[in-house]
Image (spheres, grey):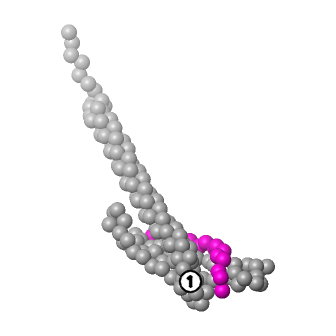
Amino acid sequence: MSNIAPSNSERGAILFISLIILLLVTVIAIGSVRYATLDQRISLTVQQKNTTFQAAESGLSQNENAMNFKFAIDQARVDGYTETFTFTDTSGSQVTAQATTRQVGIVQGQSLRSDGLKLYRFRTESNATMNNANTVTDLEAGFVKAVLD
């Protein structure tokens, strides 16, 4: 049996191919980690936007419900009725919501009733902010309320 010696041109080829494969695996691993980190940041942003949206929506509801009381209606008709509330969400972030309701008009055709009942149009603007994330949501809604003057 004869031993065949590798030629000089084949020396180190396995090492070079191994290094190329290792480099490719490393690039794929780094890309996967970056993708996972980006996905996590997107998920956090969606969660923060959802939290501020829910807070702003709560402000709209709270002010609309407050219009069942004469003092709130009187204030909304003059210079706006404002409610502000703050809470801490499950991640420990502080969320502040503020809603302001203003009278924007009287429903035409209903303002001259003899019983003193008038239909007023109101608009509520609500703003919620998550302080540590600079996430803000602005909402507005309109509604009609019957008021006995």
Which quadrant, please, contains the N terminus? top left
147 is within the stretch colored magenta = yes
Residue 131 screen position, x and y as percent: 39, 74
Inspect the image, locate mark 1, and give the three-letter code of the amino acid beneath it.
Lys
For this orientation, the residue located farthest to the bottom is 78
Label 1's element? helix
Q: Quadrant of residue 135?
A: bottom left
Query: Circle 1: is it few (<14), some (14-19), or many (20+) Cα within 10 Å?
Result: few
31 is within the stretch colored magenta = no
What are the residue bounds of the magenta stretch?
135-149
| In the depicted structure, whether residue 40 falls above or below residue 9 | below
| In the depicted structure, whether residue 83 falls above or below residue 20 | below
For residue 41, side relative to residue 76 (left or right):
left
For this orientation, the residue located farthest to the right is 109
The structure residue drawn at horizontal position 61% and vertical position 72%, both measured from the top left corner, is: 141
Look at mark 1 in the image and give the residue it sits on.
70
- Let me know if residue 94 appears in the view: yes
Residue 60 screen position, x and y as percent: 54, 72
For residue 45, side relative to residue 14 (left or right):
right
Of residues 20 and 117, which is closer to you in this image? 117
